[in-house]
Image (cartoon, helix red, strand yellow):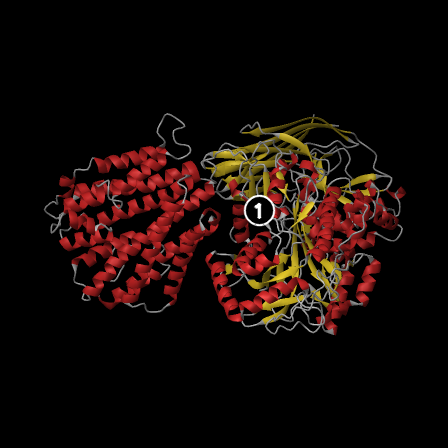
Amino acid sequence: MERRISTATVADAADSTIPTSAWGYRPAAFGFDEAFESDASPRPAFSELFAALSSLGEDEFSRRWTQAQRVIRDNGITYNVYGDPRGTDRPWQLDPLPLILGAREWAVLERGLEQRGRLLDAVLTDLYGPGRLLSGGVFPPELVLENPGFLRPLHDVPVVRGARLHLYAADVARGADGQFWVLGDRTQAPSGAGYALENRIVVSRMLPEVFRDCRVERLAPFFRTLRDGLAELSPRNVDTPRIVLLTPGPYNETYFEHAYLARYLGFTLVEGGDLTVRDRAVHLKTLGGLQRVDVILRRLDDTYADPLSLRSDSSLGIAGLVHAVRAGNVTVANALGSGLLEAPALLGFLPAACRALLGEELFLPSVPTYWCGEPEACKRVLARLPELVIKPAIPAVNSHEPVFGGELSRAELAELEQRIRARPGLYVAQERLGLSTAPAWNGERLTPRHLSLRAFLCRRGQGGFEVMPGGLTRVASSKDSLVVSMQRGGNSKDSWVLSSGEPLELSLLRAPGQKVDIVRSGGDLPSRVADNLFWIGRYIERAETTTRLLRSLLTRRVDDAEGRAPEVGALLVALEDALELVRGTLTRTGDGLDAELARILVSAHPSRTPSASVAAAYRAAGVVRERLSVDTWRVLGELHRLVEHARSQSDLALADALEVAASLLLGFSAFSGLATENMTHGPGWRFADIGRRIERGCFMVRLLKSTLVSGDDAAVLDAVLETADSAITYRSRYPGIVAHEAVLDLLLTDETNPRSVVYQLSALEEHVNRLPRAGRTPLLAPESKTVLRALSVVRLAELERWARADPQGRRANLDEALAELEAALPLLADQLTLSYLAHAEESFTLGGTEARS
Amino acid sequence: MRYLVRHTTSYEYSEPVSICHNEARLVPRQTPHQRPLVSRLVVEPSTPTLTSDTDYFGNVVHFFTLEEAHVRLSVSAISEVDLEPFEPPALLLSPAWDGVRDRIRRDRSPEGLGALELTLDSPHVRRADPLIDYASQSFAPGRPLLDAVFELTRRIHADFAYVPGSTTIATPIDRVLESRRGVCQDFAHLQIGMLRSLGIPARYVSGYVHNTPPPGRPCLVGADASHAWLSAWCPGFGFVDFDPTNGSIPSDEHVTLAWGRDFSDTSPLRGVILGGGQHLVRVGVEVARA
């Protein structure tokens, strides 16, 4: 029998008579309310909050909350809900009222959690080693040996300092009597610690006075322990071990958190494809070549971690990882195979395991859980089926939603009983726990909601576990619901633990005075990240140049509804070329043309429209968002929302379309400003700029080719200058004169014009010569040769000859030169991809295809 | 009896493979009746990365990586083994199967746990009632375990058609039970599933059979390819091999490579490649008397 601990009756202060208003909050009629005693007086931990709220007033509270919600949206704090038609990026759901726990009740919970962390670590060590729990009859063998989470390739494999559990989470809740119970353990890759941190940032900014006055324990020391603890587990004895955070990728429900934590902890965010195993050690593929990885903090499930030795259908893992672990060359946190302990069936056997392994009584009980594989327990469960909750014993074997016996009809109960009798070992039954409630803000008033707290623990470098003071409180979505899940539309809360002394102020930055090795970021950028930055640069530039072209056309349509102006025809050809459409596809005149131009501006088809390019840039940015500043991400988000909104409107009038184009262009210049001024000019920035320069170069060459190779119309030249954003410079240099030669000089060969072709090529030359692998051999790299060749075409230009038209009005020499440039730029992109970014090949598993007799 | 075994797997790719990682279980095991003499693993293109390791079930696992781009890969395992002929076990002297079943449920000694593990579900083998329905006529209460197991082996051999190509590695055993057709791997999985459903420990064995029968005996099915059979565990007898594909108890013609819960633990060659496009695989097995 597990010992219960009583914490709720431990009041933190004697004074419980503070007459505070809680805006008419009424706790639920039954059960334990976190904020109020059963006699309706506020609990001491909450009294400060309620006092502050009443002086703040509901209006001010509402106003601040609106502001805070905007921060959540602008910072892109999201949670992906599988199968949600609203798209994968759903804004994070946060309730502004924190859950508050007093120092003394927290100390009791903390002690229980710390013991549980040590226990589960010891259980893992035993099951992957001597197996005393099995031979001593403490655990039923099938719960381990038939559990797909028991990874045989990791059995008897030593790990650094014997540490298997590094970051552990327990879902705890209070029953009606106010006692804490553990609902479940998360031992392989617990999520939520990053969201807890983000919740803290949002709520402490929204209620700074309250936060300060309440003396809330800070979260930063916990993350420092986590970071330092992981660094100490490097198998190599190096000063700064390389630690990576391994994510399944942007489609994972908690991807935001992976990116956020990686940035906060200073780890490199990687996907499986960024890592490769050589000589039984894990390496990161970077621009500068392969770099050894010492510690992997993984957010990938056990069985997906290595398609060679574990699940062969995994495309997310790292082939050979298990062999690297077996060779002792890398530390994986949590150790591969730790998911084993998430099986609910083990909960009931932990008190005995605690006695067997630690020689202690289990202090913090699990919700009473009965495994039906034991005949006695099964009999008792079947007798009380309507009172219990039935869950899969090992979810990886037999996954289904929890079944509440009380909600079943008689026929359904009989059917359930039959299923349990057929394979009793597949089921566990748990007592129903009437989760406690706390006030939640529904936009108008405070209402009670059921909640559970996900508490986090991390290993200390010297052993033992540290508990995060706080955690992620999750709240049921409706008043009566007892299901607490972010996947099911639940809400979350910041969780405050009140300090008994002064809270420790700490930043994750090192203390001043400590010796620091100066580092200039360089070759350690993962190739995949560089690839995405390259494409962000290209897509944004593509969006910008096509928008400019469309704007030139739209403004001319305002003046010339008849469609007789010759430059409209020329610009339409340029548009078709830029969009890679067959010439003549677009309508040439009339109202149909206006509608078509507006549609191209906001439509995702064809694939090179401004709107499609913004969407593509946004997608690419989502994959590397930990590399982008919050402002950059915000600008991209705004652009994305702008095109989405414009697309949703039917029949965009000409004026509206011009308005959209103007807003887009403003957004693009904000983006380039941020890129130039706010990004370190390291390889990441370089690749983004290379993408942008290649795209702009392509566009300019095409524009000139579409409009200037034949024809002699001054109006066309004018339109081209405007589209190339060079009209003002031109008019100040050549007032009143429009000549081909002068236009060509400004747009092709003028090194000072940031829109000219030569300007793009010079910038590209500088970039390729400064990439990490440039200059390693005395010979020019292929990409350097390509740029040099293209540059000499423009630098040796014979403008006078190129500008001269033959009797048919064609400029053949210009055409030839432009054709050469048009081929060079895509070639350069391919060469750079081959040298630096080629890694995106798909992997396949072979085997099981042997001739079978 | 001394055998020379050569097992070659070669892959050809339509596009270069930039890197591949491989795991091989191609070295014959030491058993009471089998003594490996020499074993060599030859990988082409050659690689300095070959390392060897022992897995959970004691099989030798080779791990190697090809880090240079390649369009073909061939892996040959060449082994020489001595097989000692032995008398078939005295089936009728084995203990009653139901007594063994009950004892295994309670035994927590290392040997007992090892046996219990082989009565549980594994990736390719799930216990199920239809498997018991088929098997139970051979398992009258009190019948000697090995005698019952061998009868089941012969029934499967008689009732099921050996049809190459009728199944894939993904075909579940309940489908094999229904269709009554399959190949060695299916029959091994099927009988393992039946034994486990009854509570009798059984493991999967991968290996080869020799293809020239002694005078007067028919050629064994499964020659010139990888073969698979099973071992049942019986107190006092240890693991005893049964070959449902041939309806026999293996003696000195079965070369044992590796064992585990089912095929997934014993896969002779597994690899993960990057790139490669389409691929063509060829497998050749020769077992010759040395």
Locate residue A196: give its quadrant. Answer: bottom right
Residue B84 at x, y = what percent?
78, 29
Frontmost residue, A149 versus A582? A149
Pick the residue in front: B8 or B180. B8
The image position of residue A66, as x and y in percent, is: 49, 65
Q: Chain of mark 1?
A: A
Residue at point 81%, 61% (across, down) = A378
Q: How many numbered callouts?
A: 1
Residue position for label 1: A506
Residue at far left of view: A807
- Above or below for A643 versus A325: below
Q: Is residue A580 visible?
A: no
A716 relative to A381, above or below: above
* Image quadrant occupied by the C terminus of chain A: top right
Q: Residues within 10 Å of mark 1 (few under 14, many from 20)?
A: few
Of the 4 image quadrants, the one containing the N terminus of chain A is: bottom right
The reply, left or right, for residue A522 in relation to residue B245 is left
Q: Secondary structure at mark 1?
A: loop
**Left or right for A345, reference A579:** right
Near-viewer residue (A347 or A73)? A73
